Amino acid sequence: MWVTAGLSALLAVSVLVAIALGASVIPFRETLHYLGVALTGGTISPDEVPRYSVVWQVRTPRVLLAVLVGAGLSVIGVALQAMVRNALAEPFVLGISSGASVGGSAVVIFGATAGLGVYTTSVAALASALAAAVLVYLAARTRAGLTPLRLVLTGIAMAYGFQAVTGLLVFLSPNYTDAVSGVLFWLMGSLGGATWGALPPSAIGVVTCVVVLLWRSRTLDVLSLGDETAASLGVDAGRTRRWVFVLTSVVTGLLVAVSGAVGFVGLIMPHLVRMVVGSSHRRVLVVAPLAGAVFMVWADVVARTFFSPQELPLGVVTALVGVPVFVVLLRRRGYLFGGR
């Protein structure tokens, strides 16, 4: 598919250019040289060590994490919109990101579970995200199963509740100013804390999510048609909805734990992709992660360069850049959820 090939090439170029860009621009040729040295075990002169460290230890893991977060959020958005048959569904509509913010904020403000070292905030955020998913599931589940409308309403209500808890933690903080600054990461998102150690769990989660959803793409096609139609075609809508909920909750927790609550991407990217490739989930699930990855890489470039040395929250950039583009495209081409 030409769209897939084009986005793959664009992503590769975007990654290399994004590594070169920053508060101090490193020439593209030098960037390629340092990447080659890191990958092949080559040598550099002592005066090149600072630039090499910026390229390999700071920017490369950050850009790769942007790829994973953008791809993961986009794929999760596709799955959730099919699961609840709602065009407004996205990775954070179920309250999972708000739940993660509670755990991450608690560590930032009070130093809870600080014995876990550098991974304290990530572990706490992931644990609270999974706990939030369990609470949403238990509150939304009825004897009739997990219905889409009840799941969405419960998730939205829980999200407001978790946000209130986060606000309460900030209010109770012994140092209010520092607490607000630290909690902003969890509320708006940032890739400033990216490390090589953060990549493997996120990569495993995103790849697993994409593979499983592609494998069950026909099931998602049927599920998006409604429970009655799904039942007539031999698909257990309740069971499908449960495993999709579990899978997306775990991966969302993994991503929020390393990037904070980056909004908009999982909501809009699936719709933009459907405008181009149609509503078949097999095609959408191939193109959406590539499109989301490209978008997130450049959003992060904007966040860390436009107001350097200060850094914009990533969620601000994704909304400011993405909303106008989406509105223009929506007005120029007729579009309905689930089709052209």
Image (tube, helix red, strand yellow):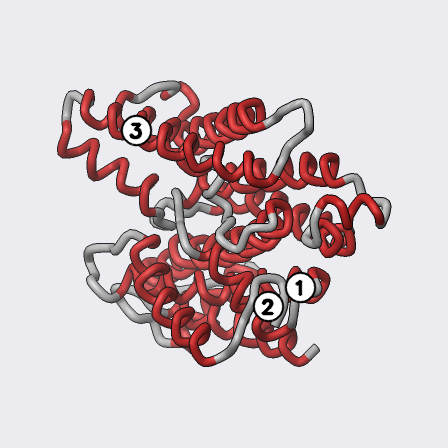
**Looking at the figure, which quarter contains the N terminus?**
bottom right
The three-letter amino acid code for the residue at tag 2 is: Arg
Q: Which residue is mark 1?
A: 286
Residue type, numbered disc 1: Val
Q: Residue at x 64, y 76 (%)?
A: 5
Q: Determine the residue positioned at 39% across, 19% down.
A: 113
Residue 20 at what x, y percent from top left? 38, 69
Q: Earlier in the sequence, mark 3 or mark 1?
A: 3
- Percent position (x, y) of residue 301? 35, 64
How many discs mark residues in the rendered view? 3
The three-letter code of the residue at mark 3 reads Ala
The answer, for residue 42, to whether it is visible in the render is: no
The numbered dot on residue 274 is 2
- Residue at left offset 20%, top offset 62%: 307
- Quick check: marks 2 and 1 in contact, CB under 8 Å? no
Task: Please tell me which of labels 2 and 1 falls first in the chain.
Answer: 2
Instruction: Judge the density around disc 3: few (<14), some (14-19), many (≥20) Cα neighbours within 10 Å.
Output: some
Percent across and percent down for residue 276 are 59, 75
